[in-house]
Image (cartoon, rainbow, N blue to C red):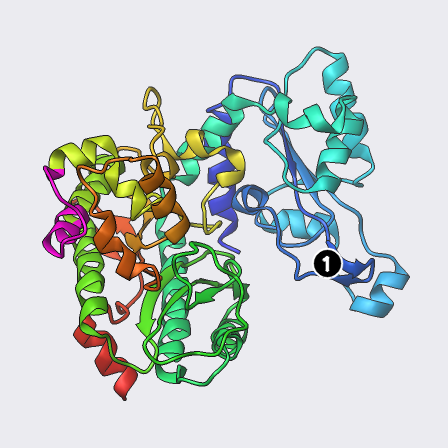
Amino acid sequence: MFSKETYIARRKKLATSVSGGILVFLGNNESPANYTDNTYTFRQDSTFLYYFGLDKPGLAAVIDIDSGGEIVFGNDVDIDDIIWMGPQKSIADQAAEVGVGKTYPFARLAGFVAEALAKGRTVHYIPQYRADNIILLSEILDRKPATVNEGASEEFIKAIVAQRLIKEPCEIAEIDRACDLGYAMHYTAMKLMRPGMIEQEVVGAMEGVVISGGYMPSFPTILSQHGETLHNHMHDKVLEVGKLCVIDAGAEVPSHYCSDFTRTLPVGGKFDSRQADIYTIVSTANTFAAEMARPGITYREVHLAACRLMLQGLKNVGLVKGDIDEALALGVQGLFMPHGLGHNMGLDVHDMENLGEDLVGYDPGQERIRQLGLGSLRMARKLVPGHVITDEPGIYFIPALIEQWRSEGKFSDFINYQALESYYDFGGIRLEDDLLITESGCRRLGQRRLPVTVEEVEAAMAC
């Protein structure tokens, strides 16, 4: 939790950005894993955390824009709770810590919102992703659950996005902490990974680092020798010499700020010449994108420039042919990198994605380009100081996709399909760092950069 003044200032700024009515914030509840009392690790809603800072289940809040009033809704514990959990601060005391002076029992939320609706006031809320909160809103608003998110307030969403996109110094310090912990996660894998191990052994060691030093992984760890599958969560394979292992993992610290790094490691500690060639194309693109990222340029421009560099590299090794600029305009790069260069990051590893990817990642008037790879770019905005984004180029050889394009005769003037046949067992390579846009450019978050060149990775794995 940050200072009381931080939350007061955030709420005050938000209230001046929405035209009128009440703003409703729903916190998260405990979520059962397999029966009511056996729950998943609790994770508070990020928007609720950002404005109210209270990291407990069973809470909601309202800001009355017209009167300036603020209320936290929640229930004080009873003796049964105290028996199991010990004494707890009252809701009033917790609310006071973040500068809110009025509290009500949770049951009064429905009546408070109903009264506002009856008076013809606007009730602003954001899209919900938890089923219990969708049901709660459906009952309060008298809407079918399936239509609740259709009524979410775009004005409210845009105000939140504008505020949360630009990270405050206190947030940047927490993201730096998360990146330091993420560094420790990945460096553990570099030191531990040996042929004959099961992938899950490495995953367990990495996640143990996070749980010991932070809160939890910021998302389910991706660790696979089948890196051509972008989000492969299967960890049951034996590590084999000669394979490439893509590791995409991040840490979440107790304040819930996140990191997100990817490294691709050669099982056995050495790249073969073919692997080194492709890896170097990706590592060069990763560094190039960071050098290019600065205020005033759109991240879509950075994405396209990184893709152009990789297409040229693939042409140099005989997998792509023809005019590179023409190939880029047509979208040939989507065969090799069917995802975007990066996304926003902060309290969510994909920051605010629950609010709508286009509203978060695209400037007004900036439309998503429907092209494989570019169409999956989650962050295309013009960069400004305070943005925190990922930089994660990749090259993948996906046999099913290659064969589909080949059978369609797609881009045959630019793709050497025959040469690609020998890469069907290659897998994929992705390299990801986390960037803060500064006044003059950008910096990588965290105290140290993970080994990234062929030479650095091999040296780290040899020790």
- Which quadrant would residue 333 be assigned to in this image? top left
Left or right of 164, for residue 67: right
Q: Pinpoint residue 391: horizontal percent, then vertical percent.
A: 29, 51
Q: Pinpoint residue 460: horizontal percent, then vertical percent.
A: 26, 81
Residue 166 part of the magenta-drawn span: no
Left or right of 306, for residue 26: right
Q: Which residue is mark 1?
A: 89
Left or right of 355, for residue 242: left
Picture layout, residue 433 above or below residue 299: below
Q: Pinpoint residue 128: horizontal percent, then vertical percent.
A: 63, 36
Amino acid type at circle 1 is Lys
Q: Pinpoint residue 303: horizontal percent, then vertical percent.
A: 24, 41
Residue 315 part of the magenta-drawn span: yes
Residue shown at 18%/51% (left/top)? 319
Q: Label 1: how many residues lie within 10 Å, few (<14), some (14-19) or many (20+)? A: few
Left or right of 227, for residue 149: right
**Count of residue discs:** 1
Whether residue 360 is visible, yes or no, is yes
The quadrant in which the C terminus is found is: bottom left
From this viewpoint, which residue is outermost toward the right?
80
Q: Compare residues 336 and 394 and report the one nearer the observer.
A: 336
Q: Compare residues 266 and 437 and report the one nearer the observer.
A: 266
Q: Compare residues 204 and 386 and report the one nearer the observer.
A: 204
Magenta extent: 310-324
